[in-house]
Image (tube, rainbow, N blue to C red):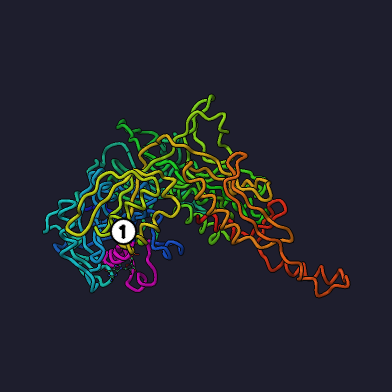
Amino acid sequence: MSENIRNFCIIAHIDHGKSTLADRFLEIGGAITRNEASASQVLDSMDLERERGITIKAKAVRLNYKSKDGHIYVLNLIDTPGHVDFTYEVAKSLGAVEGAILLVDASQGVEAQSVANYYLARDHNLKIIPVVNKIDLPMADKERVKKQLVDIFGFSESEIIYVSAKEGWGIEDILESIIKQIPPPQGGIDEPLRAFLFDSSYDEFKGVIVYLRVLEGKITKGMEIKLIDKGDFYRVTEIGVFNPRPQEKNSLTAGEVGYICCNIKNPRDVSIPDIVIDKNNPTHKKSFSYRRLPPMVFSGLFPAAVGDYNNLRTAMEKLSLSDPSFVYEPDHLDILGYGFRCGFLGLLHMEIIKERIEREYGIEIILTTPNVRYEVTTKKGTFFVESPYKFPSPQELIEVKEPFVKAVIITPWEFMEPLYELAKKRRGIPRESDYLGQDRMKITFDIPLAEIIVDFYDKVKSVTKGYGSLDYEFIGFRPADIVKVDILFNRKPTGVFSFLVERSKVLERSRLIIEKLKETIPRHMFEINIQAAVGSKIMASVKIPPLRKDVTSKCYGGDITRKRKLWEKQKKGKKKMKMLGQVEVPSRAFLEVLKI
Ligand code: GDP
Ligand code: MG
């Protein structure tokens, strides 16, 4: 039975055509028609994802494929996300497969995520099939990309498959290669159950839907199972596969990929990834250990309208289910009221969560300036601090360390110099650089995460005219001179705009923020003095001059009701304001500061 199964995923740099290729597979697998496929990319079920071209959630689909020699195969395709923040998500799905298709755009060539994903797949001992996509494009350069695949990864020319996912060229070649190259799953059917839980989603009626790959044995409806990580027991109420629509079954056996439901009401009861075993016949094989990536970027998230707090909490619960790398805890700030302190893998991850809350749940939110997590030592010990409000005073502080990443940039060689300059400005420490083929370079830096979470990616793109690509991974904490900067309005601390920054960057960051505030906060009846301060020392300041009072001057004579009406009208004009002391701050100001 498992001789006819192949489990695989597609790994690619963003926009190299993974979703499009997945659709072609689904057509051939008979699951959907070409019309359905072109109407929407089936694996990307969320609007937002489609818009951004990112598949955030890994999902599994089952394809039936009749090979050229007449055998019927079951191919399980696990969809993996491809963006720089989501390496962790990719890695989760790799535990469920034996092989991976490395998809590379024929016009772009190998990029940073191609390299990162390749090594992830290799670390999981997967059989990797190199595929060059978009050969229909006039700019396609098959020879160049072929050479890269050979030079960088050591593939042989004959293994490389050339396709156009858009035009549907070469799709069967990939499927035939999957059957021949990727080994069938190995686990024995007669052994005790051991299944790899790699994803989950939530259904209002069924509760948590758990995606799993059976490694050994068999899981059946009615079976009592144990989730190893939390140690809880459940009875399986439903089993099935996605074809891509759910299709119920009575069991899944070794090698198969599908879903189960067991009346798990609380998303938090499921850890991802995890191992599932049979309660009454537990396997004695040891479990596996998994490097769970901790959140690296933190920000406060508050409802713009106080009444939205409970809705927001519900939204966060649901989002964190489908995305365990997103974490949150309740928080309170004088000015913004009740909200949450959230942790994200990176800045893009943060933006996606924010947009999903606003779009899918219709809640308008305010995000505070993001920051990284510092390792702080005081007399009381060593602990992590994410929030500027919890940062110890200089007197208490013994040592601070900040997170560092190894950043890899792949770029045409002519942009090497400006990239080095950019990295230097961001406190980057150059490591090695290598030629990739004749025209490209791979440059590596150690660089503080704080320096790249905000707009580094955009900067890399603009410096390299769009040709550069970036990947990074956390390498550890290193000592740093970090200070807390407060933003004051008329000498009163605002709280919300406080941030932690490396000492050499205090002036630069402070100026940026106060200038943005000056641009976005409308004039008031009084002068607003905006200052950035470290402790009691003012580092920078700007002033917003008072409004000229001529709005009401044309009705002098003192008709107070007319004046009031004018004032009301003025107020309505400036929507979505937040009071910070005496000062009305538009939401836009928060967002602008956030973008810095
Ligand atoms: P993903 O980010 O890897 O999932 O990439 P998508 O499948 O979303 O594709 C990114 C873009 O490339 C889309 O605009 C696709 O229509 C386009 N695309 C994908 N495959 C091909 C192809 O074979 N030829 C051409 N010309 N465009 C393609
Ligand atoms: Mg996609």
Q: Nearer the viewer, residue 22 or 151?
A: 151
Q: Is 116 part of what is drawn in magenta? A: no
Q: Is residue 391 above or below residue 6?
A: above
**In the foreground, 512 or 565:** 512
What residue sits 23% from the left and 51% below the top?
99
Label 1 CA crowd tier, 10 Å (few <14, some 14–19, many 20+)? many
Name the side, left or right, on which 225 lies relative to 553.
left
Above or below, comparing residue 402 to residue 576 in the picture:
above
* Image quadrant where residue 192 sits: top left
- Residue at 46% from the left image edge and 62% from the top image edge: 48
Question: Can you tell which quarter of the image residue 270 is in?
Answer: top left
Residue pictured at 45% horizontal, 52% vertical: 454
Tell me residue 319's x, y (percent): 50, 51
Q: Answer yes or no: disc 1 within 8 Å of ligand 1.
A: no
Q: Is residue 152 visible?
A: yes
Image-based side of 129 in relation to 467, left or right: left
Q: Mark 1 — residue?
A: 468
Residue 430, horizontal then vertical, whole percent: 30, 45
**For the residue labelled by badge 1, is the local secondary structure a helix, a strand or a loop?**
loop
344 vs 422, left or right, is right
Relative to 139, say whether 276 is above or below: above
Residue positioned 27% across, 50% down in the render: 443
Horizontal side of residue 476 vs 319, given as left or right:
left
- Confirm whether residue 265 shows in the render: no
Q: How many marks?
A: 1
In the image, the segment drawn in magenta is: 15-43
Ligand 1 shows up in the quarter that is bottom left
Q: Amino acid at mark 1?
A: Gly
